[in-house]
Image (cartoon, rainbow, N blue to C red):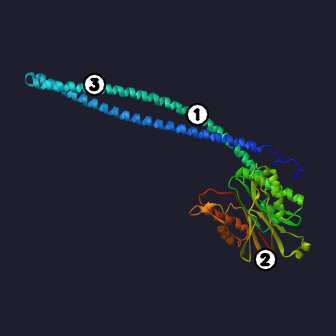
């Protein structure tokens, strides 16, 4: 018998969830990659055509300049010829005296006339070359227009594909938000608490979860492999399994929950066959919440913590305490590698204490003057200041410090920080 609920999973609005969203998304992603590659090729060809067009324009300009020079030479030659004609008329008036000079000028005139003829021939050649280049320009422009029309058609197709993918991701965001507990519900369970949640993309591989069940409060922060849609799939699997495990166990210690979650995730993803190595880092706090009539007998209050790849940070009397979980994550195992045993840690709350669970997204954010990671030590120093503030002011304080560090850098990873304050 399956460990999962037998009821069909439904999306908000009552519509059944598609049985093959991953295949559809993969097909869309493949099509988008093919279109992006085709676009890159077309852009390269367009740039080559543009360069050729610029070269032709440059040659046309050179030809026009040469043609202008030739025309100026012809004008000069014509002016000289007029001068020679006037001089010849003067010589005819006194032929006897200027006969020798006329003969010299005649030779020079023949020479210059020959140069003029050569210039005319060169001018004809330039005109023919110009007409040929102009014809090529017309042909090139027609080809460019054809290319531009093809690019416009492909851009329209890409825009259509992008719109469909964006609509699917937006719908996935609504599903993920519906599965995450709202802040109002969290603060009903733990009034002194906050959630700082900042996905890198539209949907997130990080998730947070809180549930009050059988006089215990379960607080969970998860960091799944991948970002965006793949990470969101893993986070949905994680939250669904947590609901299922608690419904079956009726409670349980956090180390036992991690053990069952690890086994089920490995089985679901067929990791024993070596076909998948995805997983998640997940931290769980279980807080005692006894009925009022026996609450006094349960002092001091206890917080039981276990983690796969994460840590619990808490402040008591102004002192920072860091409780490290197991280094191995849930799932993300390979064929032949056995599951690890998770360990729990019991914390007695003897004074007002502030607890923090977080993914590694905050401390991995790039930024600062040298574009480095925020790092764990700087994050703990930030919490040292943050924990003294009222809980409802802490998210804004974290946000302002993150933005100051990040600057113009893109967000590196999904980020989630959840904090809660307990009295003894």
Q: Earlier in the sequence, mark 2 or mark 1?
A: 1
Left or right: residue 105 versus residue 150 is left
Q: Which mark is residue 117?
A: 3
**Residue at 88%, 70% in the rendered image:** 290
Q: Kindly indicate the quadrant of the structure image that contains residue 109.
A: top left
* Marks 2 and 1, how far apart at CA: 72 Å
Under tag 3, what secondary structure?
helix
**Residue at 75%, 45% in the rendered image:** 22
Q: Which mark is residue 149?
A: 1
Above or below, 113 against 147 in this view is: above
Which residue is the site of mark 2? Answer: 351
Name the spot of residue 373 as percent of width and height, x first: 62, 62
Q: Kindly indicate the quadrant of the structure image that contains residue 108.
A: top left
Q: Is residue 90 visible?
A: no
Q: For label 2, count other residues whose C-alpha is less than 10 Å away and answer few (under 14), some (14-19) or many (20+).
A: some
* Marks 2 and 3, how far apart at CA: 110 Å
Q: Earlier in the sequence, mark 1 or mark 3?
A: 3
**Residue at 51%, 37% in the rendered image:** 48
Name the spot of residue 14 as percent of width and height, x first: 84, 46
Left or right: residue 405 versus residue 23 is left
* Quadrant showing the C terminus: bottom right
Name the spot of residue 57 as percent of width and height, x first: 43, 35
């Amino acid at each position: 018998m399956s460990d999962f609920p037998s009821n069909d999973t439904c999306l908000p609005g009552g519509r059944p969830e598609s049985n093959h969203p991953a295949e559809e998304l993969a097909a869309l992603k493949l099509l988008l990659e093919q279109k992006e590659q085709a676009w890159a090729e077309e852009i390269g060809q367009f740039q080559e055509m543009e360069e050729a067009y610029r070269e032709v324009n440059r040659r046309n300009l050179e030809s026009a300049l040469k043609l202008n020079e030739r025309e100026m030479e012809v004008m000069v030659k014509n002016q000289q010829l007029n001068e020679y004609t006037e001089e010849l008329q003067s010589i005819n008036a006194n032929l006897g005296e200027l006969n020798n000079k006329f003969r010299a000028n005649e030779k020079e005139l023949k020479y210059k006339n020959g140069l003029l003829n050569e210039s005319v021939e060169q001018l004809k050649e330039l005109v023919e070359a110009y007409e040929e280049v102009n014809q090529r320009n017309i042909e090139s422009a027609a080809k460019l227009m054809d290319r531009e029309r093809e690019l416009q058609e492909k851009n329209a197709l890409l825009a259509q594909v992008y719109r469909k993918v964006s609509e699917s991701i937006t719908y996935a965001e609504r599903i993920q938000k519906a599965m995450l507990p709202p802040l109002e519900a969290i603060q009903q369970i733990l009034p002194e608490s906050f959630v700082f949640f900042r996905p890198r993309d539209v949907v997130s591989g990080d998730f947070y979860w809180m549930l009050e069940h059988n006089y215990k409060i379960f607080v969970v922060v998860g960091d799944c492999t991948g970002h965006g849609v793949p990470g969101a799939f893993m986070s949905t699997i994680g939250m669904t399994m947590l609901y299922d495990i608690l419904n079956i166990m009726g409670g349980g210690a956090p180390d036992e929950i991690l053990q069952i979650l690890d086994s089920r995730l490995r089985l679901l993803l067929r990791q024993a066959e070596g076909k998948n190595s995805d997983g998640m880092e997940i931290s769980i706090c279980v807080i005692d919440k006894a009925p009022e009539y026996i609450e006094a007998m349960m002092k001091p209050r206890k917080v039981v913590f276990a983690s796969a790849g994460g840590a619990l940070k808490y402040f008591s009397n102004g002192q920072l305490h860091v409780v490290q979980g197991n280094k191995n994550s849930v799932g993300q195992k390979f064929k032949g590698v056995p599951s690890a045993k998770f360990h729990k840690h019991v914390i007695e709350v003897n004074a007002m204490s502030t607890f923090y669970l977080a993914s590694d997204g905050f401390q991995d954010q790039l930024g600062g003057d040298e574009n480095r990671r925020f790092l764990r030590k700087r994050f703990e120093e930030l919490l040292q200041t943050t924990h003294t503030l009222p809980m409802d002011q802490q998210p804004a304080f974290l946000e302002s410090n993150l933005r100051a560090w990040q600057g113009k850098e893109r967000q590196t990873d999904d980020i989630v920080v959840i904090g809660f304050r307990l009295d003894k």
